[in-house]
Structure formats: C-alpha cells, structure tokens
Image: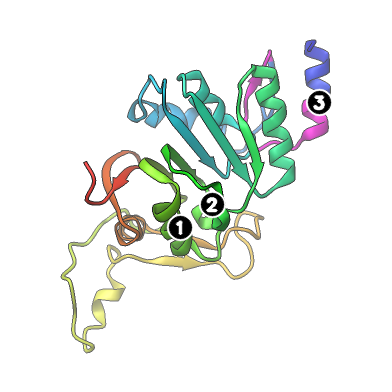
Amino acid sequence: MKREEIAREVEKLGPWFHNMELEGVWTAPKHFLGDYPRQKFQRFAHAIPADLRGKSVLDIGCNGGFYSIEMKRRGASRVVAIDSDDVYLDQARFAAKVTGSEIEIRKMDVYDVGQLGEKFDVVLFMGVLYHLRHPLLALDLLREHVVGDTMIFQSMQRGSQTVMQLADDYPFSETEIFDDPGYPKMHFIEKSYSKDPTNWWVPNRACVEAMLRSAGFRIDAHPEDEVYVCKLAGGA
C-alpha cells in the first residue's frame, strides 16, 4: 500500500490507542501518554526472550496489535490475538497486514479463553485487569486454560507501592491493618475514571502481587513498575 492509502485507512479506523509506525504513518502521534505503548515496552522488553522461534503467544486484549506484532518480530511461530472490541480488532488486522505480520486475530472475551482449547508458551495480559468486573475470575481462567509457561502481566496501579509482609491469618479484632498503605487494596470505580467507564478496578502494588499469587502464579521478575513476569506456581 502507498503511504497515502495507509494514512487514509489509519484515519478511517481511528482513534487509535496504540501508537504504531505503519510505513511512515503514525497511528496516534498525539497520544496523551506519549509514544505509547512503545516507550513502556522499552522498559521491560529485555524481560521477554529476544528469540521466540518455536514458541506460541496469546495476546489477550490485543487492542491495535502493538504487542502481537512485536512478538512476531521476535520470531514467534504462532501469535493469537484476542479482543472483544471490533474497532480494536479492525485496527489490529490492518496493522498486521501493513507490517506483514501473520497473526491470528479473533473476537473473544477473556472469560471465554477456555474455548481456545490450548495452552501457550507466552501469554500477554497487558492493560486488561482493571477493565474487568471480575478480575480474579479472569486470572483463575488464564491459569487453568491458557498459560502453559509464562505470563507477562500489566495493570494500572494507584496508591502505595509499599508491600506489607503479612501473616497467614489475623484475629477478627484486628482492624488497623486494613488502613496500612501497604495492605493489598483494590479501588472500585463506580462510574468512570480518565473518561473511561470501563475502568472498574485499580489495585495497589500489594494487591496486584497478592492476586497473582492467589491465582496460582509465581512472580519471577518485576522489570517495570506495572509489569510482572509470572510462571505457574510449582513449575520450573
């Protein structure tokens, strides 16, 4: 496609949340977060194997396809990208076409991942948790159905970055601990946050880590403030 054709299609498919360069055309050059998600990816890219040849990848909540395309660039033999939003799926299909990335793009809700009927070497679960009404259920389903080895997890966080060392149990009379900034907390958004009514929950750091452990994941690395590299608990 000529640059002018790409520019027209990018405009037609907009607005974009993923800023990507498609043959010299940027999809979201005025993004309120800057060059997003490229700038964020640069801070944790080293935590994902540079060579993914022979590996399968599942990108949950793929949005415009930035991470799926990056995984193909690392040689992933198979990349499946899912999202429940038709606009994002159309964007991802177009970005994959322009970049020549062979990606399987499907419309699917995170709660339906069991329908895929397989487990993947790498699962990307980036920027999805806080959009879900049932976030812990989603983590349980990923653990049970699709994570075969590694999950790259990211969630928006608010509140303290302190993580308390907690006992396994406390008496019913203990109440002050819940006011400690380092206690796991999930903030509920009843209406909207950042003009986005799909923002439902925002955890603090302690809550993110506790939820991951509760769902059966082991945190192997924390390469960026909001990003975790997780393995199956009890695995190698």
Q: Quadrant of residue 166?
A: bottom left
Q: Amino acid at mark 3?
A: Glu
Q: Residue at x 70, y 30 (%)?
A: 93
Asked which secondary structure carries label 2, the reply is helix
Q: Residues within 10 Å of mark 1 (few under 14, many from 20)?
A: some
Q: Quadrant of residue 104?
A: top right
Residue furthest to the top: 2
**First reached walking from the N terminus: tag 3 or tag 1:** 3
Q: Which mark is residue 113?
A: 2
- CA distance for labels 3 and 1: 36 Å
Residue on which disc 1 sits: 141
- CA distance for labels 2 and 3: 30 Å
**First reached walking from the N terminus: tag 2 or tag 3:** 3
Q: Position of residue 114 (x, y in %)?
A: 52, 53
Toward the viewer: 126 or 192? 126
Relative to 137, residue 41 above or below = above
Mark 3 or 1, closer to the camera:
1
Magenta stretch in the rendered image: 10-24
Asked which secondary structure carries label 1, the reply is helix
Identify the image quadrant of the C terminus: top left
Q: Position of residue 20 (x, y in %)?
A: 62, 25
Q: Which mark is residue 9?
A: 3
Q: Amino acid at mark 1?
A: Leu
Q: Quadrant of residue 121?
A: top left
Disc 1 + disc 2, Cβ < 8 Å = yes
